[in-house]
Image (cartoon, coloured by chain):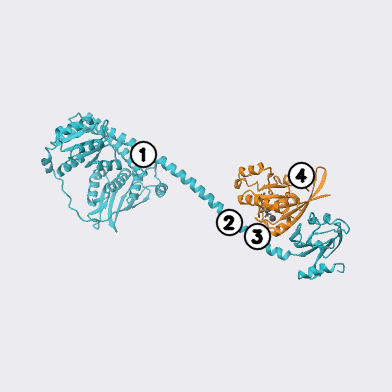
Chain colours: A orange, B cyan
Amino acid sequence: MIQKKICMIGDFAVGKTSLVARFVRQTFSDKYLTTIGVKIDTKLINLSQQQIKLILWDIAGSDALSTVTASYLRGAAGYLLVVDGTRKPTWDTALNLQELVNSQIGNKPFIFLLNKADLQEQWEINNLDITEQLQQGRAVIHTSAKIGTGVEEAFMQLAMKLLNNPLD
Amino acid sequence: MARIPFSIIKYVRFLWMSEKVITYLHIDAQGQLVDWGGYPNYYGLVNLVIGKQATEQISFLEGLLPVVHTEVIQFLRVGTSNSAHVHIVPYQSHTWVLLFDATAEHDRQQKVQQQANELSILNYRQSRLIQQMEETWQALTEEKQQLEQISQAQGRFFVTLSHELRASLSSIINNTDLLDIPLEEYETHYLTTIRNNADHLLSLIDNSLEQTKLEIGQVVLRPSRCEVKQTLKELENLFLPLAQEKGLTFTLESQPTIPSFVMIDGLRFRQVLINLVNNAIKFTEQGFIKVTLDWQDDQLKFAVADSGPGISPESQAKILTTFHREKIAYHLPGVGLGLTMSFNLIQLMGGELKIKSTPAVGSLFSGFIQAPATGYIPVVAETSQIITTTSLARILIIDDDVVNCSLIETTLRERGYLVVSTYDSRDAIQLTRQIQPDLILMDLLMPHLDGYTMIQRLREQQFTQPVIAISASNFEHDRLYALTSGCSDYLVKPINIEQLLAVTERTLCKC
Ligand SMILES: Nc1nc2c(ncn2[C@@H]2O[C@H](COP(=O)(O)OP(=O)(O)O)[C@@H](O)[C@H]2O)c(=O)[nH]1
Ligand SMILES: [Mg+2]
């Protein structure tokens, strides 16, 4: 069976743990519990008549890559860059982290997730920022771990990218 | 434990641990699980099968094998199990995966990190809120400024309009006054009705004008020495007949502590008292009206009490809240514009106005204004003898308002002055040269040549006699402008005949 390691990257409290919980167990909790180190979850998916086992590394959030975090990235086939749409600085962190991750593990498929899409009234990221990324050919998906919007789509799209990645 | 190579045991000892506590997974060069020991299920690793691919059973190893150097993964948790520090150690083409319990350390770190992260988010939200509040504040301030500008513009428009109304009305009033000839009784009745209504209209316009000026900040106080007892006497003269007519007792009381003279804008203070007494008489059907004045610590205290119907608590509250919000009460039931104006005037005079009222018993309007005592200054008596000394004076009247012009002319002629008048400002310079007047009375707003330019021209031609301005404008800045342009005095239309005579005599007397 094909196995793929996927890392959840992003500032703290953007919703990495919640996105995994929604995708793997269909659960959500409003309570915030800080992740320390890394949490491993797996999920079997069916994609183009193949069964794939996704191994999800939910890494503690930080705004810079420490050497500890770098050790979590080894062997990753791709990653999700999670942003809290209600906190503009987490978007800048994600852009920054993307470059750092790229320098660590090389060019791997990734997708930007603008999470907490259910909190539109507190939204702080304007369309211009997004358009700029889209113009560079990057994928951006609005998600909500709370109500489920875009979550399945996000993981499936990344999995598809991994399958089609000739470098892997 | 015999199957663990000595180098691995050495590595474990190097970490200051007993090899007995470790959980290990032994993987061969092909990636198959060769052996395991300790408590893998404590770390969520269950159903391990020897001889099967390690990455299929131990998913976190996906992508990691083989390792060249020892790799350490700190605080790794599989699912909801316990936290481990995972050391992946290469040994003779095989791989040893060692798991050490990190649960206690994990929980400790989590507590600290949790607090730090929550605080950081809280700070962020707080600063955003403050920023948003500042933005909202900014927007509201701008909106307020715009509204104030609109309100100011409306106020100025209203003031201009009122001056126009005032000018026309003054013509009507003066014209009626000029009809001072023997009349039939019914004619007198008509005339009185016209005069009364015109007076009422004029006072309405004046009040609205005054109120608007208060609102747009055009009212400027002119404090001067004022004799308080005189003001009381005037009030008595004004209201005693009215009160008696309604069968009301009207008393005025002033404490002996009141200084003879205080520095106040006497005109404005009188205006306030007149408003209050007028209201009291208007609403009281039987009983009394009592006015008291007192003075203490440079404050002039006043009270107007009546036995009228009183004001309901709701209306009182309304009056007070509107007042305290520094907004203008436009429409309060049973309370005219006069009361609102009084509130605002008193505030301007550094004082306070309070209302106490019991329905069906009566009302008490009391308060104070700032009124520093000032030394005694003997009043210069303006006796009628002056007239004889100045009655041969030559006076030139320039006013395009024919009615006003003829009213002044008639009045001054009756007093024995030599009067020449013209409606056309263009003749004025020529006339001045011909008759050499001792005094010029001049309207400031005229077609062809306005008053200001005219004064300049006259002065250029060495005309040194006084000029008194006549204007329909009650604007403070108009008055100031006239006085600084060289007018010696300023009369407002409609012309009050007594005032006209007094000013004329005083001016002539001085030169
Ligand atoms: N409204 C809303 N809240 C979310 C969403 N995702 C996560 N959260 C909340 O955001 C906080 C942080 O989530 P978490 O998954 O722990 O973030 P992590 O630090 O990136 O793993 C928690 O209180 C979650 O309940 C979302 O999509 N919508
Ligand atoms: Mg987390």
Q: Are marks 2 and 4 on the same chain?
A: no
Residue beneath label 4, please? A160
Q: Position of residue B296 (x, y in %)?
A: 29, 58
Disc 1 marks a residue whose amino acid type is Arg
Q: Position of residue B433 (x, y in %)?
A: 16, 33
Q: Point out the frontmost of discs 2 and 4.
A: 4
- The numbered mark at residue B123 is 2
**Callout 3 crowding tier (Cα within 10 Å): few <14, some 14–19, many ≥20:** some
- Quadrant assignment for the N terminus of chain B: bottom right
Ligand 1 within 8 Å of disc 4? The answer is no
Q: Chain of mark 1?
A: B
Vertically, is B114 above or below B308? below
Disc 4 marks a residue whose amino acid type is Met
The reply to whether discs 3 and 1 touch (Cβ–Cβ < 8 Å) is no
Res. B332 image quadrant: top left
Locate residue B190 relative to residue B327 in the image: left or right. left
Residue beneath label 3, please? B114
Locate residue B405 relative to residue A10 in the image: left or right. left
